[in-house]
Amino acid sequence: MKLSRDTWLAIGLLLLLALVSVPAAITQARSKEIPYLSTSSSPSGLLALKLWLKELGIQTVGEVMPGFDPPQNADIILIIQPLLEVSENEWKLIDKWVDEGGTLLLAGDLFPSYLAFRHYEFEVSFLLDRPAELTSQTPLLSSPPLADSAPVRPAYYLTSERSDFVTHLAANDLPVLVSFEQGKGRVILSATPYPFSNLALKNEANAELVLNLLALSVQEPAVAWLDDWHHGVQGNTIIGPGQWLRGTPLGHALLFITGVIFVALLMRGRGFGRPIPLPHEIKRRGPLEHVTAIANLNRKAGHRDTVLQQYRHHLKRHLGRRYRLDSSLADAEYLHSLARLNPELDIAALTDLLKRLSQKNPGENEIVRLAAETSKWMDNNR
């Protein structure tokens, strides 16, 4: 059975709906497994760190905010493996908060983390020889006393031209975890986020490392903010119709319906015909093509008598133009007047030519001969 055009259109729209819906469902499913999220219980999540901080008497702040705004009552901010770039306006808020006495712990090994490290004039480099553990470089990590190594296998290390930072952990003597003072506060940078994950905290050495980093704060932290904002968990504040269309289910539905209607109209519409070439692409026909076309049309229409009459009229008008003779005069009167005005003219030959131009149903060869003879008369009597 042959399917109609409308049936094929319906099938195409259903396939389009499937192509849009399936990736959206996959994306939604994956969104529940965002790494280093404070509410994630996966091996790479931070839920264990959040619960452990509560057991240590440290209040954790992690509510969804309509806009990025570090809590003013927080003593330490943990930005672990950010997936979104920190904007300039957000850096202004963070720097102001650190200058006033806060402690920022920034850890990650993805591109947004590299950009964040550059804010503090640090770069990351790849470790060609990855060690199985990090070694302690300073005696500052002593609350509780930290063993000489931590079971972390980093892939990158930090480099900087700054001279005011302290290296706490290193891989092959290359700094991986550093800290420095800024204003009244402190910034801690780590080229690896692994020690803060649910899986890493099962190891006692990693737990002791986290306790030491908390102790590096200017004061004993009482409130910690786990930043989920830069993992894409943000408030649903809608600003303007554009954001409403992009950020709400109803807006998504409206955009999809509009797209389906557009595709339907496009598929059902008729073609607009062949494109008209631009003016500079049009080639003008030559005079000979025009003459040839008129001759072919006259031949197809059988206008032989008319063609001869046209030659006859042109000949009489051409010869009588000098003497102001009317070409519509009868041949006898016209030839008598012409002979009187121009005695040298061969009136007998001209009379014979006009007679032959008046014949009926001439052949094409005869027309060609008469046309040539007429042209010769006109050329010789200019």
Image (cartoon, helix red, strand yellow):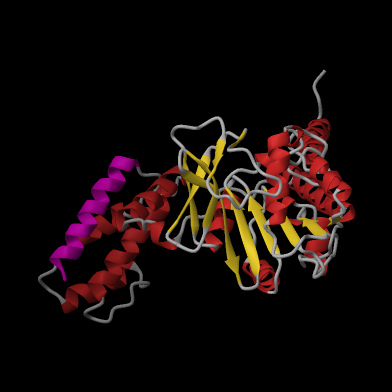
Give above or below for 220 relative to 344.
above
Give above or below for 56 relative to 172.
below
Q: Residue at x 20, y 54 (%)?
A: 373
Answer left or right for 305 relative to 376: right
Answer left or right for 55 relative to 233: right
Give above or below for 116 relative to 261.
below
**Viewport quadrant of the N terminus:** top right
- Inspect this view and state whether residue 275 appears: no
Q: Residue at x 53, y 37 (%)?
A: 155
The answer to which of 211 and 101 lies nearer the viewer is: 211
Most distant residue in the left direction: 344
Q: Position of residue 178 (x, y in %)?
A: 56, 53
Q: Position of residue 244 (x, y in %)?
A: 83, 62
Report if residue 376 lies within the magenta region: yes
> Dominant secondary structure of the magenta stretch?
helix
Give above or below for 58 relative to 153.
below
Q: Quadrant of residue 229?
A: bottom right
Q: Position of residue 9 (x, y in %)?
A: 79, 35
The answer to which of 382 and 13 lies nearer the viewer is: 13
Q: Residue at x 82, y 57 (%)?
A: 247
Answer left or right for 337 relative to 153: left
Q: Position of residue 28 (x, y in %)?
A: 81, 40
- Inspect this view and state whether residue 27 appears: yes
Which segment is the magenta one? 363-382
